Amino acid sequence: MNPAKSSSFVLDDALHHMWKAHVASVAYALPKFRDSLKYLADPEANFGEDWANGVDFIAATHFSTDLQTTNNFQAFLPQRMLVEEDVLPSISGFSSQQNKVLLSLRALNKANRLTGMSPPEEASSP
């Protein structure tokens, strides 16, 4: 049996539906929690907005969310909450890959805002 097929779903179709639901849940929740971002350090609040925006890009790839793949890619995300002293692109204690991912997420979010593809950010931006 082909592992990419189970029941009547092809894996890519299942991932499409899963990501569609995930993007919808983020789009629904973000405005409801945006006011809470003010209680976080600006870099952490910005990362939250950047990550929420980045989910759209990740979803477009139908990224596989199996445990091993997710675990491997988590190494590129912050291992702690960001604080005021954390300044991109060289956050102390983060790997160069983590800094690059955070900088890329920041750039994608800014590009989306500048082109009108996402709502303006309410948290302060560096």
Image: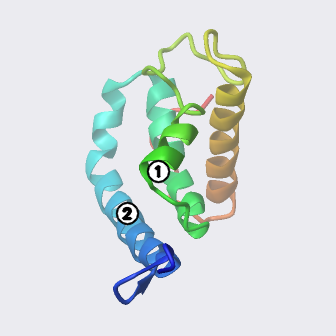
Tell which of 79 and 3 is nearer to you. Answer: 3
**Residue type at mark 1?**
Ala
Q: Is residue 11 positioned above or below 114 on the image? A: below
Badge 1: residue crowd in 10 Å (few <14, some 14–19, many ≥20): some
Q: How many marks?
A: 2
User: Could you tell me if residue 13 is visible in this image?
Assistant: yes
- In the image: residue 46, left or right of residue 26: right
Q: Amino acid at mark 2?
A: His
Within 10 Å of disc 2 (Cα), the crowding (few <14, some 14-19, many 20+) is some
At 64% from the left and 58% from the top, the residue drawn is 112
Instruction: Give x and y (percent) for residue 24.
Output: 36, 68
Residue under label 1, please give it.
52
Q: Is residue 45 left or right of residue 73?
A: left
Residue 92 figure quarter: top right
Q: Nearer the viewer, mark 1 or mark 2?
A: 2
Q: Residue at x 34, y 44 (%)?
A: 34
Q: Position of residue 28 (x, y in %)?
A: 31, 62
Disc marking residue 60: none
Label 1 to label 2: alpha-carbon separation = 10 Å
Residue 119, above or below 103:
below
Q: Earlier in the sequence, mark 1 or mark 2?
A: 2
SS at mark 2?
helix
Residue 42 or residue 80, whichever sits in front: 80
Percent from the top left, x then y, of residue 73? 57, 41
Whether residue 123 is visible here, answered yes or no, is: no
- Taking the spot 42% from the left edge, 76% from the top edge, the residue there is 14
Residue with the mark numbered 2:
22
